[in-house]
């Protein structure tokens, strides 16, 4: 198959699906979730986690000896719930149902139960497990936190369009203010099974598929997936899934006001001694301006702004995967971001490769060669 394709040329759906390829949506999903609600983590040092969170741009919604809730300036639920635990781990995502009746429908179809959330959160939840064993929560009726004062976007002079006169542009070097949770990315050894599970149970739909160069006939190896709210546009991706040798969290992303908020906030993080993983740049799939950081527990978190919004009429795009194709502009993707920098994380992935190749899953020698080709591209 001819894979001569410049990932930096063209638009979202320049390459649509070929006959017989994955349609990118389930024909009759159980429910259609409205959005991500929050992410849950376990960490041993809540004080250290909160210090980084404030530098990154979160506000504290609630704090106890054993729990830390982090929020953005938008109204709604907290973005991140952290529980004290013996080691750092990602516990799973929570999605917000469109209506409370969806929980009963989901529970009936999956043999689960609708149970109350803690009184401090309010509302109801159905707890599921995806094909990798990751806990996935679907919620409704939670307490709504009121909006906080937001960081206002700057007024820009674009070329000959001058909206700002007799005033200067002086973004302060201080923590940006996170507005909301945008998306989360997982790696899975059972990519196709996991993809179909999220489409069928939660009604998500694919915005873009990526495949290993030269191996399109084997199907996609990554997908960017959005919520289906009909004619109401939603983020290009709320969830992204990628095939790999282990089942793990890759990163999560949080919206900020604009490029200046992202860049000045990044300078503040750098001055506080935190590690930039990759950035600043602009993605291709999703178009977001991005900046990636590692928190003290090693998790990658992203500031983003100016992302694409699609309604449910847009069909999935298809493109070959490459490291250079992760960005329209910006520095090359770093070894740290790609997970191949020498260190504990790379060693864990090497061990995972050896295990995955001996197990019954989708990660085989052909997929390994494809992944290595992507990392070198």
Image (cartoon, helix red, strand yellow):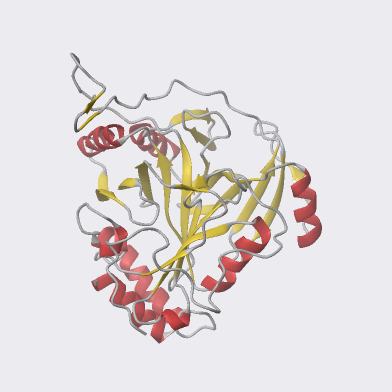
Identify the residue shown where x is 51% and y is 38%: 79
Above or below — where is 233 with respect to 322? above
Above or below — where is 211 with respect to 300? below
- Position of 310 with respect to 52 (left or right) is right
Q: Between residues 125 and 149, which one lies in front from this camera angle?
A: 149
Name of the residue lying farthest toward the top: 166
Q: Provide residue 208's location: percent of width, then percent of height.
A: 45, 62
Q: Provide residue 133's location: percent of width, then percent of height.
A: 60, 65
Q: Provide residue 330's location: percent of width, then percent of height.
A: 21, 52
Count of numbered badges drawn on the protein: 0
Above or below — where is 120 with respect to 227? above
Is residue 43 visible in the rendered structure shown here?
A: no
Q: Provide residue 126's location: percent of width, then percent of height.
A: 72, 50
Identify the residue shown where x is 32% and y is 78%: 3
Quadrant placement of the N terminus: bottom left
- Position of 349 with respect to 113 (left or right) is left
Identify the residue shown where x is 47% and y is 29%: 60
Q: Between residues 166 and 250, which one lies in front from this camera angle?
A: 166
- Position of 21 with respect to 212 (left or right) is right
Is residue 138 visible in the rendered structure shown here?
A: yes
């Amino acid at each position: 198959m001819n894979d001569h394709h410049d990932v930096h040329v063209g638009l979202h759906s320049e390459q649509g699906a070929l006959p017989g390829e994955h349609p990118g949506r389930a024909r009759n999903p159980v429910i259609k979730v409205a959005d991500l609600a929050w992410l849950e983590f376990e960490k041993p040092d809540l004080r250290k986690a909160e210090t980084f969170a404030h530098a990154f741009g979160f506000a504290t919604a609630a704090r106890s000896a054993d729990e830390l809730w982090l929020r953005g300036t938008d109204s709604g639920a907290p973005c991140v719930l952290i529980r004290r635990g013996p080691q750092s781990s990602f516990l799973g995502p929570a999605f917000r149902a469109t209506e409370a009746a969806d929980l009963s429908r989901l529970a009936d179809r999956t043999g689960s139960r609708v149970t109350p959330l803690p009184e401090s959160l309010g509302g109801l939840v159905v707890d599921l497990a995806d094909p990798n064993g990751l806990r996935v929560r679907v919620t409704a009726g939670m307490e709504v936190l009121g909006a906080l004062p937001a960081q206002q976007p700057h007024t820009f002079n674009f070329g000959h369009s001058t909206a700002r006169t007799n005033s200067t542009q002086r973004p302060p070097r201080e923590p940006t203010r996170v507005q909301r949770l945008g998306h989360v990315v997982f790696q899975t050894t059972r990519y196709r099974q996991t993809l179909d599970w999220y489409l069928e149970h939660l009604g998500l739909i694919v915005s873009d598929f990526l495949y290993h160069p030269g191996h399109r006939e084997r199907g996609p190896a990554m997908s960017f997936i959005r919520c289906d709210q009909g004619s109401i546009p939603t983020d290009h991706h709320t969830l992204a899934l990628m095939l790999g040798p282990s089942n793990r969290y890759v990163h999560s992303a949080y919206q900020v006001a604009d490029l200046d908020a992202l860049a000045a906030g990044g300078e503040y993080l750098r001055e506080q001694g935190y590690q930039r993983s990759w950035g600043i740049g602009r993605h291709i799939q999703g178009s977001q301006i991005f900046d990636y950081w590692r928190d003290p527990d090693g998790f990658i978190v992203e500031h983003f702004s100016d992302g694409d919004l699609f309604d449910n009429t847009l069909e999935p795009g298809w493109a070959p995967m490459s490291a250079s194709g992760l960005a329209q502009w910006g520095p090359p993707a770093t070894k740290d971001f790609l997970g191949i920098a020498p260190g504990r994380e790379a060693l864990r992935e090497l061990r995972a490769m050896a295990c995955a190749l001996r197990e019954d899953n989708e990660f085989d020698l052909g997929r390994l060669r494809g992944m290595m080709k992507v990392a070198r591209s």
